[in-house]
Image (tube, helix red, strand yellow):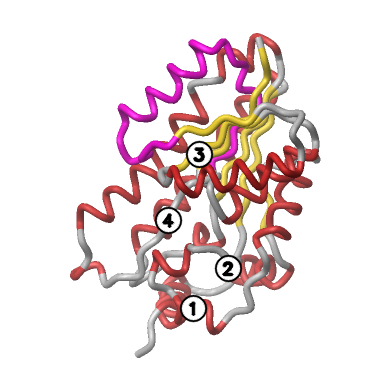
Amino acid sequence: MEKFCLITGASSGLGKDLSILLAKENKNLLLVASNLQKLNKAKEEITKINDKIKIEILAYDLSIKENLEKIYKYTKEKNYFINFVINSAGFGDRTDFVDMDIDFELKMNEVNINALTYFSNVYLDDMKKYREGNILNISSIAAFMAGPYMATYHASKAYVLLLSEAIYYELKKYNINVTCICPGPFKSNFVNIAKNDFTFKKMKPISSEKAALISLKALKKKKPLKIIGFKNKLMIFALRLVPRKLVYSISAHSLKKF
């Protein structure tokens, strides 16, 4: 039984940078994303860094449940021990709730919530059996507040945070570590999909490479939660001290120009 790290959203951004870091640690990789061309490019790039490890790619749309099952079936047929799961796939949408494309928003929930829940769960039997496992879930500082004009995304990231903290508590007795990462803006293709350049222009995003380094370090320290950025930590602490109406008013003004 070979050990593999499964990384979703691995074709670009944080998912790819985390894959690169794991490759440098000589870990076999199963890279998952929807774009086959970008996956092949990521594989080529990572192979140049370490050509001694096994790197496999699976191009699937994670908003479709049957595709999640196909990925799981593939790993079981190959007799892989997925001892490391990184749920990095996800996207957002900066749209007024009344004007949103409901199919797009539901697809967002399928990827941000359901795919993450699926991959956080299906490999637990093996992890429990061998008393070895790591799950890294990528949330956001958006998880700590309602997000008018980006409502679905904020709500989905709150789910990721709460799920991760709960299963961290449940699984630690089996030596399975769960870490939830809550970054602020970082440089990736997220802003283009989410149409959220207004927010990104107001904040200085960090690089996805730096976010990946911080994330993996937090996982190794077995931290249940890592908020990336000192200012973000201060902001989230301050949220506890002000009325919720004020919080989502401030959030709204950070997401849309009035």
Instruction: Provide the residue designation for mark 4.
Output: 91
User: Which tag, 1 or 2, sits closer to the chain's start?
Assistant: 2
Of circles 4 and 1, which is in front? 4
Callout 1, which amino acid?
Thr
Give the Cα distance between marks 4 and 1.
15 Å
Bin the neighbour count of mark 2 within 10 Å (Cα to Cα): few under 14, some 14-19, many 20 and up. Answer: many
Instruction: Provide the residue designation for mark 3.
Output: 163
Query: Which residue is depicted at the point 59% across and 67% down?
Result: 187
Corner quadrant of residue 56: top right
User: Which tag, 4 or 1, sits closer to the chain's start?
Assistant: 4
The spot of residue 17 in percent (x, y) is: 66, 51
Q: Which element carries disc 1, helix, strand or loop?
A: helix
Instruction: Provide the residue designation for mark 1.
Output: 199
Q: Which element carries disc 4, helix, strand or loop?
A: loop
Give the Cα distance between marks 2 and 4.
13 Å
Instruction: Provide the residue designation for mark 2.
Output: 185
Tell me which segment is drawn in magenta.
Answer: 59-87
The spot of residue 101 in percent (x, y) is: 20, 61
The spot of residue 176 in percent (x, y) is: 68, 25
Bin the neighbour count of mark 3 within 10 Å (Cα to Cα): few under 14, some 14-19, many 20 and up. Answer: some
Q: In which quadrant of the rendered image does the C terminus lie?
A: bottom left
**Magenta-colored stretch includes residue 62:** yes
